[in-house]
Amino acid sequence: MTREEHNLLRQGYKLEVRESENWFCKRQPVLGSRLQQSKECGTAAMWDKQPADEQESLSSSLKSNSMPTNMGH
C-alpha cells in the first residue's frame, strides 16, 4: 500500500477492492438534509488529483464572475 493510500485511510476513507484495484470511499452528508448521505469513491490517484482540479475550477469561476473595479471611470 502506498503512502497516499495510507493517508486516505487516516482521513476516514474506507478501502474497497474493485476488480483488483484499490478504491477509497467516504460518506458525505447531502446538502440540505440531516439524514441523507452520498458515497464518494475514487482511486488514490483520483483523490490526489481532486484538490488541483477543484482549485482550477474555482479559479476559472472567479475569473469569469469578476467585475471590473473602475467601471469605466
Image: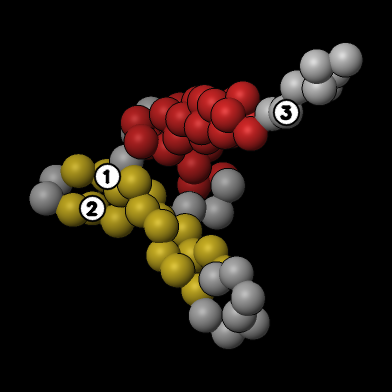
Task: Kindly report the distance in space between the C-alpha atoms of the residues bearing marks 3 and 2.
Answer: 47 Å
Residue 73 left/right relative to 8: right
Q: Measured from the top left, where is residue 49 in percent x and y? A: 42, 29
The front one of 17 and 51 is 51
- Residue nearest the viewer, comparing 39 with 59: 59
- Percent from the top left, x then y, of residue 18? 18, 53
Q: Residue at x 32, y 41 (%)?
A: 43
Q: Is residue 70 above or below residue 61?
A: above
Q: Which residue is mark 1?
A: 22
**Residue type, mark 2 in image:** Val
Mark 1 or mark 2: whose residue is earlier in sequence: 2
Screen quadrant of the C terminus: top right
Vertical arrangement, residue 30 with respect to residue 36, above or below: above
Measure the C-alpha gap from mark 3 to mark 1: 44 Å
Q: Is residue 18 left or right of residue 40?
A: left
Say which residue label 3 marks: 67
Give the residue at the far front of this rendering. 73
Task: Check disc 2 and report the residue beneath it.
Answer: 17
Q: Tell me where residue 64 appears, x and y as whole percent.
A: 58, 29
Picture quadrant of residue 25: bottom left
Describe the element under mark 3 as helix, strand or loop: loop
